[in-house]
Amino acid sequence: MIRLILSLVLTTFLLLSCKSPEEPFTKKTYPVKGKIMVDGKEPDFPLQITCHNTGEIDTEHPTASGSISKRGGTFELSTYTTGDGIPPGDYVLTFVWKKFDVMSRSYTGPDKLNKRYDEPEKSDIKFSVVEGKPTDLGIIELTTK
């Protein structure tokens, strides 16, 4: 009986001490923040922000990074958890500004930015994340015209 209990305790300890299978594929991220202004004003609805890596893409363990702006236009980019930042590299940001429909829990309607920043080729909001350093993008001025 004592052997069974010791065996169970040892097995439990070993299982709890093992790392999760996802850990080896998690990349180090660094904080990136900024503020969006549209036509010189703070946006009245959140904007969807997506990061697009312009450098070499890790096809074996790709990441997806982005954010939704907060009231006042501020944002923090995320990869694995809210506000954790993004891996080092070169990026371009895309923006889509639609109304959030509470009933469908989705963004609907026309893009208030008139699709000016909805594709990486259209956006000129480019930046680099350097290993070990947080990045402050400052104020990003977008226009609807």
Image (spheres, helix red, strand yellow):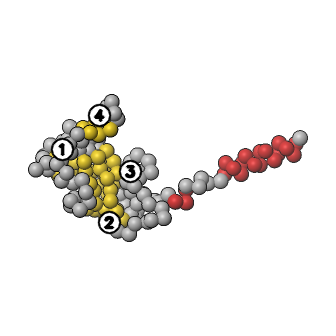
Residue at point 22%, 48% (across, down): 36
Q: CA distance from mark 1 to mark 3?
A: 23 Å
Q: Is residue 34 above or below residue 54?
A: above
Question: Which mark, residue 101?
Answer: 4
Residue 11 visible in image: yes
Position of 131 with respect to 44 (left or right) is right
Q: Amino acid at mark 4?
A: Asp
Frontmost residue, 100 versus 31: 100
Frontmost residue, 40 versus 101: 101
Q: Is residue 45 above or below residue 119?
A: above
Q: Is residue 57 above or below residue 80?
A: below
- N-terminal-most mark, 4 or 1: 4
Residue at point 48%, 62% (across, down): 61
Q: CA distance from mark 2 to mark 3?
A: 17 Å
Residue to which mark 1 is pinned: 112
User: In x, y percent, where is residue 92?
Assistant: 28, 60
- N-terminal-most mark, 2 or 3: 2
Q: Amino acid at mark 3?
A: Ser
Q: Between tags 1 and 2, which lies in front?
A: 1
Q: Are marks 1 and 2 in contact (CB under 8 Å)?
A: no
**Quick one: which residue is furthest to the right in this view?**
1
Q: Badge 1 local density, few (<14 within 10 Å), some, or many (20+)?
A: some
Question: Which mark, residue 78?
Answer: 3
